[in-house]
Amino acid sequence: MTVLLWILAALATPFVLFVAWLAWVFLKEFFSAKAEYESAEESSGIAAEAAEAAAVAERLGLLPLERQNTELAAPLPAEWAAALAAVARGEWEPAAEAMHGIGRDWERRSAFTALLGDKAAEADEWLLSWEDARPDDPDAAVVRASSTVTLAWKLRGAKRAKYTTHEQFDGFRRTLESAPADVARAAALNPDDPTPYVKEIWIALGLGRPNAEMDTLWAKLTELAPHHYEAHFSALQYWCAKWRGSERLATSFAERAAAGAPAGSLLTVLPLIAHLEHDESDDTAAENTPEMIARVNTVLADVAAADPSHPRLPEVRHLLAYFLRLQGRDKESLEQFRLVDGYVEALPWRYRVNPAAEYCAFRNATAKAAEEVAAEVSTEAAAGA
């Protein structure tokens, strides 16, 4: 009898194992299907919420994704736009006239020089014609310096070092090493202009010049223009941990610059940029400290005091919209979004894979939240009445 039981058990074992295997497969498929269903349900909910937010933005007159300009942070002055259109046709004279008209307004000179330098880095026949017609024109010289530095960075590309090829690095370094001669010539032709030195910051950053050399360059630059926005933004990049400094050095630089800046200079935004460059947290706790709230309030006051035509004002408004939203100040954030809508070439969006999509998603969520708060206030007011 015992032998028979052993025989039956031996015969039944494969069957039991098979049934257990079937049960395991069933449970695995069941829970996998359940997870997929829940994920799809969650995705559907997120998509529905995004669609609702987009509808709110549309009702408010905000522009859809396909109408966002990804090359500029704001519309250009008409004269600048006409000059850029002319250089695209190979005509340099409108650019020369616009540069001459800017004169000693260093903020605008640096901003427009950067735009022309970017065009020349793509195709410089018009700039060569300008240089031939006016060999010692300081305006042409500073555009040449800007274009050489810009070309170097275009050759490198915007990806992190580990994703950049040896050939890209080689072209970047060779071009950047040739740039100091162009910078020196531009500086010699117009000794009062800080713009060539702003370009030299990007040479120092790219070639890894030591901090002591950067300090010397900075002293020279700020002697010419102590509160120049693009100069400070560029120097802050040098002092960031991702380049030649650290979070401590970048934050210290930003706070010193902001503390000593006159109202309307927009330099109070530098601590926010330093924070953005180094914050790796996944929540908004770091943006909601008393210190960060005070920083945002200071930038709001600075923006209110700024020249409405300041060429960097829209970039600061983009950052304000971002940080105000992170602080739950949706009504104030939406006010800033309204003033910059349609243009997304600014921080923080330019750091994202799809700047326009990121901008619109963030803006739409802000619009929806602001509308909900307004509805709650209206309901409470009606109930109180």
Image: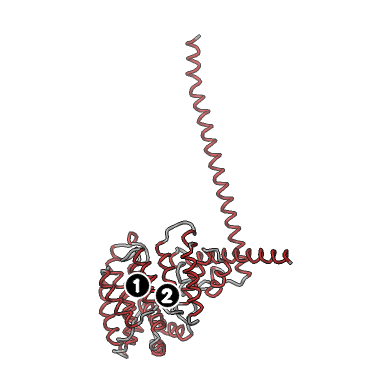
Please name the residue that numbered disc 1 is placed on. 235
Q: Is residue 322 left or right of residue 113?
A: right
Residue 170 spot, x, y in % from top left:
27, 67
Query: Where is mark 2, residue-wise?
Result: 267
Residue appearing at x 50%, y 28% in the figure: 18
Q: Amino acid at mark 1?
A: Ala
Answer whether labels 1 and 2 touch (C-beta < 8 Å).
no
- The answer to which image quadrant residue 189 occupies is bottom left
> For the residues marked 1 and 2, what is the alpha-carbon distance in whole angstroms?
12 Å
The image's colouring method is secondary structure
Front one among 340 and 98: 340
- Locate residue 191: give its quadrant: bottom left
Mark 1 crowdedness (10 Å alpha carbons): few <14, some 14-19, many ≥20: many
Q: Quadrant of residue 23?
A: top right
Residue 180, relative to residue 10: is it above or below? below
**Residue at the (35%, 62%) spot, across then down:** 160
| The C terminus lies in quadrant | bottom right
Q: Secondary structure at mark 2?
A: helix
Label 2 neighbour load within 10 Å: few <14, some 14-19, many 20+:
many
Residue 79: x percent and y percent? 46, 86
Q: Residue 124 versus residue 306: which sits nearer the camera?
A: 306
Where is residue 75 shown, x and y percent of the image?
Answer: 49, 79
- Mark 1 element type: helix
Amino acid type, label 2: Leu
Q: Earlier in the sequence, mark 1 or mark 2?
A: 1
**Residue at 66 percent of width and 65 percent of height:** 377
Of circles 1 and 2, which is in front? 2
